[in-house]
């Protein structure tokens, strides 16, 4: 996120705008602008060189009116209380818009996982659970992977929690590895979910997906499966992806005439999402500055990296061909970018709607953990498609009926669902 953009202020401003449109009660408004509970703690670790290092950990539980708090844990050097607050808030709206019975939470550790050994990472994971286990649980708060965390890490965390409570509890973390309580389809879910929405948006705008071109920012889990899905599920072309190069500490855009091949690029990407520049160059890829992705001639832009990259400055570089912006990342577009989309009639699929495929499949994972019966990948992805298509249509309908922008419509749908749950639980009558 650019330094002058505070993610939590952005989340609150977006909420305020929708709350105003809904004429929401000032007290309810104040309650929803802030997380219900916040935790900040230290995780001391013995490093491989024998020294002790202390890492900063966070967990924020924004609202659990609709069910247990839900949301990932990020391992990122630039993590702050405010980024976690923002992401926890967006999780509340995400679960509500996808209509899954869960609330919103997020966690973090200030660290750079690419500089840590496997043993050090495992200790941080177990330390995080050691600090938080009394405040999480399958009926309370259920973390998952996010930027910098992996299914293996969720496996360690679930194991630590099970050890501490004295019984096998797979439903306390989701995004676990398949074979250790994980769900088939979880890996593909967020990226494919983005593509199910893009399919619906293109249908609505009467654009032939087989002639459509997408430009993608990022090449982590979401971007990789969005690229594969755009080509293999919709028959479109992907002009470029971009990625953070951890060796050069800057990002690059990778494009190819006729479109990129995501499966090839995955084969030359390391576990931290850095593409091998030399191998890409040898295979005929054009390697440019990281910001170039946004300038490509494309019908669909998919920012799937981190917050605030589509902002007042970068948005000016967008090609006039762009018709759809599908936000694979959380919070990739600033309020100024929104104003630009509105002025230029660009169809926006807002983040907490667009990337809800991950958490929806996490919910399916929990259901399978509870039943101790596991579905096939096809069954998971089919249920996911049905759920997300319903969510898209509910938001589109509100956007058309209320004559509001898609992001505001998504906020209106989710805020009303959360407020309804608060009311039905009696929270609006003073017993919170
Ligand atoms: N980290 C993902 C998100 O931001 C998934 C969260 C989850 O599965 O709980 O939506």
Image (cartoon, helix red, strand yellow):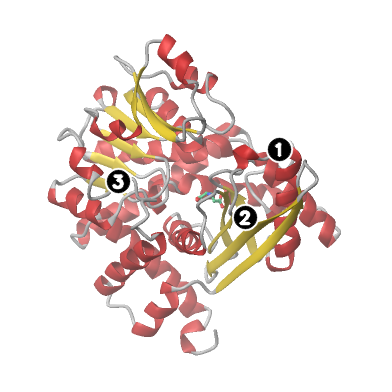
Give the SS element for disc 1.
loop
Image depth: mark 2 or mark 1 in front: 1
- Which residue sits at x=22%, y=44%? 315
Q: Nearer the viewer, mark 1 or mark 3?
A: 1
Mark 3 vs mark 2, foreground winner is: 3
Specify which label sits upstream in the sequence, 3 or 2: 2
Do labels 2 and 1 touch, CB within 8 Å?
no
Q: Residues within 10 Å of mark 1 (few under 14, many from 20)?
A: few
Kindly identify the residue that appears in the image at 40 percent across and 79 percent down.
Answer: 30
Nearer-the-camera pick, 296 or 431: 296
The percent position of residue 143, horizontal first and vertical second, equals 62, 55
User: Mark 2 falls on what kind of element?
Assistant: strand
Q: Secondary structure at mark 3?
A: loop
Q: Is residue 177 above or below residue 87?
A: above
Q: How many marks?
A: 3
Q: Is mark 2 within 8 Å of ligand 1?
A: yes
| Marks 3 & 2, CB-CB < 8 Å contact | no
Q: Earlier in the sequence, mark 2 or mark 1?
A: 1
Quadrant of the image containing the C terminus = bottom right
Residue 136 shown left or right of residue 257 in the figure: right
Distance of label 2 from label 1 (alpha carbons)? 22 Å
Quote the CA–CA distance across marks 1 and 3: 33 Å
- Tell me the residue that label 1 is attached to: 117
> Which residue lies under the disc numbered 2?
143
- Report the side of 27 relative to 406 (left or right): right
Residue furthest bottom in the image: 430
Residue at 40% in and 27% down: 233
Q: Which residue is mark 3?
A: 310
Dot 2: within a 10 Å radius of its alpha carbon, few (fewer than 14), some, or many (20 or more) residues?
Answer: many
Picture quadrant where residue 320 is located:
top left
């Amino acid at each position: 996120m650019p330094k002058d953009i505070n993610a939590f202020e952005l989340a609150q401003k977006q909420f305020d705008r929708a709350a105003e449109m809904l004429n929401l009660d000032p007290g309810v408004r104040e309650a929803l602008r802030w997380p219900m509970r916040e935790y900040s703690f230290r995780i001391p670790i013995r490093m491989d060189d024998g020294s002790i290092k202390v890492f900063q950990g966070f967990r924020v539980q924004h609202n659990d009116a609709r069910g247990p708090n839900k949301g990932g844990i990020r391992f990122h050097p630039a993590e702050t209380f405010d980024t976690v607050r923002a992401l926890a808030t967006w999780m509340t709206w995400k679960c509500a818009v996808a209509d899954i019975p869960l609330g919103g939470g997020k966690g973090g550790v200030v660290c750079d996982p690419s500089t840590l050994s496997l043993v050090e990472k495992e200790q941080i994971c177990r330390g995080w659970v050691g600090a938080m286990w009394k405040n999480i649980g399958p009926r309370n708060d259920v973390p998952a992977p996010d930027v910098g965390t992996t299914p293996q890490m969720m496996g360690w965390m679930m194991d630590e929690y099970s050890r501490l409570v004295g019984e096998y509890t797979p439903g306390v973390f989701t995004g676990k590895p398949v074979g250790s309580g994980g769900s088939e389809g979880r890996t593909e879910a967020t990226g494919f979910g983005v593509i199910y929405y893009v399919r619906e948006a293109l249908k609505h705008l009467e654009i032939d997906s087989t002639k459509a071109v997408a430009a993608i920012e990022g090449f982590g889990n979401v971007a990789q499966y969005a690229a594969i899905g755009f080509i293999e599920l919709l028959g479109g072309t992907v002009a470029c992806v971009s990625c953070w190069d951890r060796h050069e500490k800057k990002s690059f855009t990778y494009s190819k005439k006729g479109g990129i091949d995501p499966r090839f690029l995955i084969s030359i990407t390391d576990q931290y999402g850095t593409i091998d520049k030399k191998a890409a160059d040898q295979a005929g890829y054009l390697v440019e500055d990281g910001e170039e992705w946004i300038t490509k001639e494309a019908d669909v832009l998919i920012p799937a990296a981190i917050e605030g990259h589509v902002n007042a400055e970068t948005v000016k570089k967008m090609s006039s061909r762009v018709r759809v912006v599908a936000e694979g990342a959380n919070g990739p577009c600033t309020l100024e970018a929104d104003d630009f989309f509105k002025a230029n009639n660009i169809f926006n699929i807002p983040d907490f709607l667009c990337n809800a495929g991950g958490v929806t499949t996490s919910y399916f994972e929990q259901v399978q953990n509870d039943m101790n019966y596991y579905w096939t990948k096809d069954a998971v992805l089919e249920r996911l498609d049905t759920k997300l298509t319903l969510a898209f249509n509910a938001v589109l309908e509100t956007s058309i009926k209320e004559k509001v922008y898609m992001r505001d419509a998504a906020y209106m749908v989710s805020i009303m669902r959360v407020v309804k749950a608060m009311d039905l639980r009696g929270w609006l009558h003073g017993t919170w």
